[in-house]
Amino acid sequence: MSTVTQGGPSLPQERRVVTEIPGPRSRELFARKQSAVPPGIGTTLPVFVTRAGGGVVVDADGNSLIDFGSGIAVTSVGNAAPRVVERVRRQAADFTHTCFMVTPYESYVQVAERLNAITPGDHAKRTFLLNSGAEAVENAVKVARHATGRPAVVVFDHGYHGRTLLTMSLTAKNMPYKHRFGPFAPEVYRVPLAYPFRWPTGPEHCAEEAAAQVIDQIGTQIGAENVAAVLIEPIAGEGGFIEPAKGFLPRIAEYCRSEGIVLIADEVQTGFARTGHLFACEDEGIVPDIIVTAKGIAGGLPLAAVTGRAELLDRVHVGGLGGTYGGNPLACEAALGVLETIEAEDLVGKARRIGEVMLPRLRALAGRAPIVGDVRGRGAMTAIELVVPGTKEPHPTAAAEIARRCHAEGLLVLTAGTYGNVLRFLPPLVMPEHLLQEALEILEKAVCEV
Ligand SMILES: *Cc1c(COP(=O)(O)O)cnc(C)c1O
């Protein structure tokens, strides 16, 4: 058995299915959830968790599931990572809140210093902290508008940026994120993403043609001088783990620089070692003007950050940015524990290793199973896109059925994609390799059976 001690020393790193999934205790709790919580708050897998750590999630019936979700790319250091737990425990005993805007504390400053140092680019930077990815994206847009005095924000097909009014407006997909929630925020413009698998003239021309369309549309439909920011996920997350064709991001970055447009990278899902780099922008050497982070930043405590060029962030007047809980001391301690863990356990290297194990096996699976139309991703952020065999027609029911079979076998997987036909894999970076291999066997069997 492996030596991961998260979730307590007695949490074995094993898959164990002892009831049907969900079991009787979870079903009872789920019935209570149904009468206490509105259905708008959905449930991927209705097992109620009692403990989690390393690569497993244990439910109220004693089942131990292999975790290919990490709470949506959040618990990259594992659940209950010792350095996070110890720091939070100590901080909770000292003080839980003062409001950083009222009376500050050192850990917030330390997190800001660390993010300024480790994010792409060696220019002078500033960081401020918030509670959620959506709140951080909104604040990045506020800063870009304030600094440029321009109104428009350019976003991409398949983009996801959150569920608040502005970030829902920035998000591409109608159902479930936007449907009947309008009217939406103004001055949001959507342009094509270089999506190699679905580019009409094929993947070879994708980067160049998509970038040309983006630049043409901005010039003719908005006017570059009206654009405050171009906002992009370096790998589209909810949209289906779409890695833009190589060359697309550098071309967009160059265009933004030449037009005085603020380039904002939404690294909420891709950040903190997930893709085999600390930040996904590093893959093609992109240096965004502002980088937005959340999810993997604090091991599950609510924290998000806006990090950007000092000359942009310093323009906003005193009191123009903030929030009651932003950079809560427990969350800041957790973030410091996460950053220590990433370094001490070489989680960048571990993420790469996970990709090296998973991608060849997923590609081999695609060779055997024509229902798998595309295999993609980097490091520990990989996915398969399911299609009607012999076509590129999206096959969302197959994705749902494969997920259902994986869940029944004790493997937690998530779906994604504009067409709901993508299975995405986000294991904790500390997952022991025997669990990774076992999970892949379950997945391969489920795909071949469907
Ligand atoms: C999840 C996500 C968000 C929103 O983060 P919340 O913390 O849920 O508000 C924004 N952008 C991307 C890329 C995300 O994956």
Image: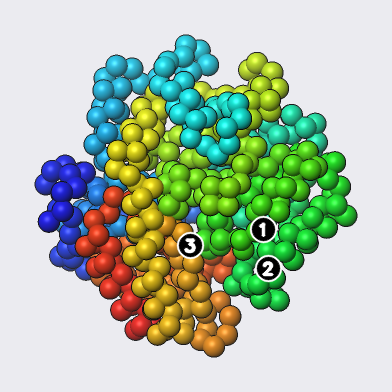
Residue plotted at (52% across, 34% down) = 305
Quarter of the picture containing the N terminus is bottom left
Q: Give how far across and how far down residue 280 sits, in percent.
A: 52, 49
User: Residue 42 at x, y = what percent?
Assistant: 44, 56
- Percent of width and height locating residue 194: 66, 63
Amino acid type of the residue that numbered disc 2 sits on in the rendered structure: Cys
Colour basis:
rainbow
267 vs 20, left or right, is: right
Question: Farthest top residue?
Answer: 103
How many angstroms separate mark 3 from mark 2 (CA)?
17 Å
Residue occupying the point 27% across, 54% down:
431
Sequence-first tag of 3 and 2: 2
Depth check, front residue: 43 or 410? 410
Residue 426 appears in the picture as rendered? no
Query: Of the residues tagged 3 and 1, which is closer to the observer?
Result: 1
Asked whether the residues under the numbered discs 1 and 2 touch, taking CB atoms below 8 Å apart as contact, a structural biologist would say: yes
Amino acid at circle 3: Gly
Give the residue number, with chain letter if any, for mark 3: 377
Pointers 3 and 2 in contact (CB under 8 A)? no
146 to 346, vertically: above or below = above
Mark earlier in primary sequence (1, 2): 2
Of 133 and 182, nearer the camera is 133
Location of residue 45 by image quarter: bottom left
Q: Give the alpha-carbon distance from disc 1 to disc 2, as whole Å.
A: 8 Å
**Residue 436 visible:** yes
Q: Residue furthest bottom?
A: 390
Q: Is mark 3 on a helix, strand or loop?
A: strand
Q: Name the residue under label 2.
A: 206
**Could you tell me the amino acid type at mark 1?**
Phe
Q: Which mark is residue 248?
A: 1
Mark 2 Cα-neighbour bin, 10 Å: few <14, some 14–19, many ≥20: many
